């Protein structure tokens, strides 16, 4: 990984997760799904289920293989020193306990230092770390810590709000319960006014464009 102080610096995305395509053995995953179906009393050779092991293996491979990207940054020539916040980034990840999805929205913000980051990259960072087996707390921390280390901003704030299918479809069956996690770094954690502003903006109801 190289740092580039040129006009539009581009930083490689963080290392590959365990679920990267280069370590995913699709035929083995397919066989395992067929075994699982058999163990669940289903016949994977039946016409209805014949293609299911292939589809399920491909679906998990896709969910565990995030799209690589470059974290493009620009010099903060205007000395912009207020909050930059991308709200309502939809994401899905896989609960590492049940391999069921948890989905919701992420709010990612930072207080710029010497550089500003391409806005789409904030969503890409969310998707990068969501493409793994996860718990919501680790996902939240990884997003914030990566931005803190890569951008060296004055502060970082990440809030995730998600519904876990392992809590709604099975087990405790609490449909609609949403889990909120956050990680604040630097000024957004330590300065009460900045912290309050960030939390107020992330919890404010979103307004549809033009409404
Ligand atoms: N902290 C945390 N817990 C999670 C997350 N996703 C799932 N869990 C929880 O992981 C726990 C696993 O508990 P276990 O008792 O081992 O599993 P279980 O018998 O299937 O538990 P129940 O879901 O209560 O039926 C459950 O309480 C899940 O709700 C997450 O992102 N963060
Ligand atoms: Zn779970």
Image (cartoon, helix red, strand yellow):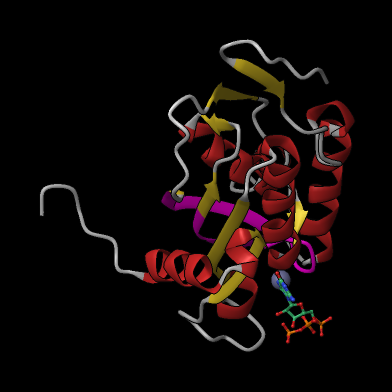
From the top left corner, tell me how far across and down residue 70 is, in percent.
65, 22
Which image quadrant is residue 50 in?
top right
Taking 175 as reference, is 88 above or below it? above
Query: Is residue 99 part of the magenta span, yes or no?
Result: yes
Taking 62 as reference, is 189 above or below it? below
Can you name the residue that lies furthest to the top here?
6
Taking 130 as reference, is 202 above or below it? below
From the top left corner, tell me how far across and down residue 13 is, in percent.
72, 28
Number of numbered markers:
0
What residue range appears in magenta? 85-107
Q: Which residue is more in the foreground, 191 or 85? A: 191
Q: Which residue is more in the foreground, 124 or 10? A: 10
Query: Going 54% across and 31% down the picture, which residue do you hit?
Result: 117
Quadrant where ligand 1 appears? bottom right
Q: Is residue 25 left or right of residue 141?
A: right
Rendered-image quadrant of the C terminus = bottom left
Query: Going 44% across and 38% down the picture, which residue do you hit?
Result: 80
Q: Which residue is more in the foreground, 10 or 163? A: 10
From the top left corner, tell me how far across and down residue 126 is, in percent.
60, 46
Magenta-colored segment: predominant secondary structure: strand
């Amino acid at each position: 990984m190289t740092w580039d102080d040129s006009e539009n610096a581009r930083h490689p995305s963080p290392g590959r997760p365990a679920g990267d395509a280069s370590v995913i053995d699709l035929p083995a995953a397919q066989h395992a799904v067929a075994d699982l179906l058999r163990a669940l009393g289903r016949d994977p050779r039946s016409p209805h289920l014949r293609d299911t092991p292939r589809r399920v293996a491909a679906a998990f491979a896709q969910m565990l293989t995030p799209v690589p990207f470059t974290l493009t940054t620009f010099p903060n020539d205007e000395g912009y020193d207020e909050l930059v916040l991308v709200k309502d980034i939809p994401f899905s990840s896989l609960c590492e306990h049940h391999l069921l999805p948890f989905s919701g929205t992420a709010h990612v913000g930072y207080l710029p230092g010497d550089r500003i980051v391409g806005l789409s990259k904030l969503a890409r960072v969310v998707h990068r770390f969501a493409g793994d087996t996860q718990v919501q707390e680790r996902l939240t921390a990884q997003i914030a810590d990566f931005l803190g280390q890569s951008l060296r901003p004055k502060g970082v704030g990440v809030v995730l709000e998600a519904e876990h299918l392992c809590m709604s479809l099975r087990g405790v069956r609490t449909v609609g319960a949403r889990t909120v996690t956050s990680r604040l770094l630097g000024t957004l954690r330590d300065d009460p006014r900045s912290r309050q502003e960030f939390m107020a903006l992330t919890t404010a109801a979103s307004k549809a464009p033009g409404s």
